[in-house]
Amino acid sequence: MNISLASINDITDIMSFINTEWKENHILARDYKFFLYEHQNNDLVNFVISKDKDMQINGVLGFIPTALNEESDVATVIWKVAKNNEHPILGIQLLHYLQKLKGIRTVFSVGINKNTIGIYKYLGMLTNELDHFVMLNSNMSDFKIAKVARPKNIPKIRFSSLQNYEIKTINDDFELKNFDFEIYAQNIPCKNKEYFSKRYLQHPIYKYDVLGAFLKNKIIGLLVSRVQCYDDFRVLRIVDFIGDEKCFVDFGRFIRDLILNKGYEYADLHSFGLDNDNLNKAGFNIIDPLKEDLIIPNYFDPFIQKNIPIYFFADTNKIKNLKLFKADGDQDRPN
């Protein structure tokens, strides 16, 4: 058995392994260019792989660094050993290899299977689930994507006339320079400008909108969203945020006007580690995933009108440093 970081020469074999052992026709099994965008690291590939005595891949663990070209936290994305694998702890060995790699601070994963939580706890991992928040369009009475038991009772969101920050769209790397990522280096995951630019401004398939909360000419917070469609209906999905959480009130004001003007059913946000009071003041309400009077779907491809919790693990005990969002890892990836 041989465990190592993958190289460019291993990509076609990894794609074949994903197709046969993980999911047939998965985007990482069929789209070579997207695979490169997601996982290429110069001549290496951000996959830990295992090969058997015949040098055939029998296990993979993919990961995505959140701070490019420096010490980073990493999100695991595809973790699978072959069905005919004879080594019972091979999957754990792949994880331990990743944890020991130079330059990696924290390993985490957003979107783990609920049935595996006991295994992660046994391995000493912190586990929990993301909170799910929503801002409903108060002008709507007929929802097609969401399920709203009493749409006529949706309160109109009102803000004071005072506005602290100007909300503007960030279009390129040059504008990102006005935000100091270093201030939030203690966040888990840490994120730098290079990661933010590649993940959102340069994404080859999804169109993300990056918004900045400006105080004079300085960016105090960054919020990322994209429009999600189902048939002829649309919603706004907020997938990432970094910055001073006080910005959320003005972000909320901007988002309220956006969903009203564009006719989106709602804006939603999956997160862990944000102050609920700031989100409430911004017009967002937390969703109880166990109730069915308000359903805000998570899956759109295929579409499932159901509240589905998103669970995570992290190999850290610094719970106050965790700031997790739906786009951390592969939860907001094309299928």
Image (cartoon, helix red, strand yellow):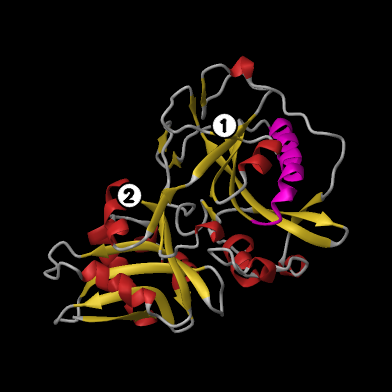
Separation of marks 1 and 2 at Cα, in angstroms: 29 Å
Residue nearest the observer in this picture, 76 or 13: 76
Helix, strand or loop for the magenta stretch, by majority: helix
Where does residue 281 sit, x and y in percent of width and height? 71, 37
Q: Quadrant of residue 156?
A: top right
Query: What's the residue at 73%, 60% (across, down)?
Result: 171
Where does residue 129 sit, x and y in percent of width and height? 44, 47
Q: Residue 164 lies in magenta, yes or no?
A: no
Where does residue 105 sit, x and y in percent of width and height? 48, 73
Under circle 1, the secondary element is strand
Under circle 2, the secondary element is loop
Kind of residue at disc 2? Asn
Instruction: Please tell me how crowded label 2 is: few (under 14), some (14-19), or many (20+) other residues with Cα within 10 Å.
Output: few
Q: Is residue 257 above or below residue 127?
A: above
Q: Is residue 21 above or below residue 245?
A: below
- Badge count: 2
Where does residue 48 sit, x and y in percent of width and height? 33, 75
Query: What's the residue at 36%, 61% (across, down)?
Result: 125
Instruction: Please tell me how crowded label 1 is: few (under 14), some (14-19), or many (20+) other residues with Cα within 10 Å.
Output: few
- The residue identified by callout 2 is 113
Q: Is residue 260 left or right of residue 272?
A: right
Kind of residue at disc 1? Phe
Magenta segment: 242-262
Disc 1 or 2, which lies upstream in sequence?
Answer: 2
Q: Which mark is residue 233?
A: 1
Q: Is residue 142 left or right of residue 127?
A: right
Q: Which mark is residue 17?
A: none
Q: Nearer the viewer, mark 1 or mark 2?
A: 2
Residue nearest the observer in this picture, 236 or 159: 159
Tell me the quadrant of the picture where the N terminus can be found. Answer: bottom left
Query: What's the residue at 58%, 35% (across, down)?
Result: 134
